[in-house]
Image (cartoon, helix red, strand yellow):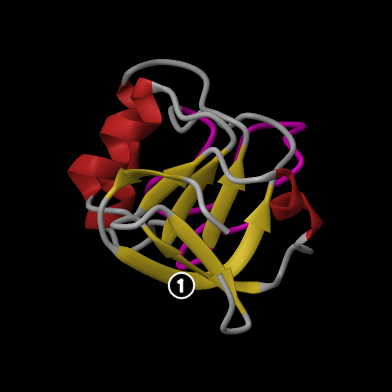
Amino acid sequence: MQGRSISKGTGSGELLVSSEPISFLSGVDPETGIVVEHGHPLEGQSIAGRVLAFPYGKGSTVGSYVIYALKQNGLAPAAIINTETEPIIAVGAIIAEIPMIDRLPPEFSDLPPGTTVTVNGDTGEVSCDGTS
């Protein structure tokens, strides 16, 4: 599936999907990679090494630094997919060198969580099971 490239590189992993936006500042623990925002659909789940798909980010600009800290701690997502990227998440992905894309076609939402996908931030493509 073709989207828009935000941050270069390639990352593969199990798809972790949230229908809700994510705040990295106080929403994700940079020391564990666990979503800690109370009431969030992903609360208690680790984002480490997974392809994290969510609509957009929310919260403070410090969220960019939290994404970078996750990378430095070896707990960052393998890649990020947004419906529509906003600057906080884009900056975090770029400085942390996490592949990132957005604006995928509607059929992306048909992929079940847990599907192994590859995000190519160079071309803006996401593929699963050897297809794109």
Q: Which residues are magenta?
A: 26-50
In depth, the one of 66 and 104 nearer the eye is 104
Residue 29 seen in the current view:
no
Left/right placement of residue 80 relative to residue 107 reads: left
Left/right placement of residue 50 relative to residue 70 reads: right
Left/right placement of residue 26 relative to residue 90 reads: right
Is residue 27 part of the magenta span, yes or no?
Answer: yes
At label 1, counting other C-alpha atoms closer than 10 Å, the crowd grade (few under 14, some 14-19, many 20 or more) is: many
Numbered marks: total: 1
* Residue at 39%, 32% in the rendered image: 89
Residue 70: percent from the left, percent from the top? 33, 50
In depth, the one of 73 and 94 nearer the eye is 94
* Residue at 38%, 46% in the rendered image: 30
In depth, the one of 2 and 115 nearer the eye is 2
Left/right placement of residue 84 relative to residue 109 reads: left
- The residue identified by callout 1 is 12
Image quadrant assignment for residue 114 = bottom right
Q: Residue at the far left: name it.
A: 95
Image quadrant assignment for residue 82 = top right
Q: The N terminus is located in which quarter?
A: bottom right
Residue 122: percent from the left, percent from the top? 28, 57
Q: The C terminus is located in which quarter?
A: bottom right
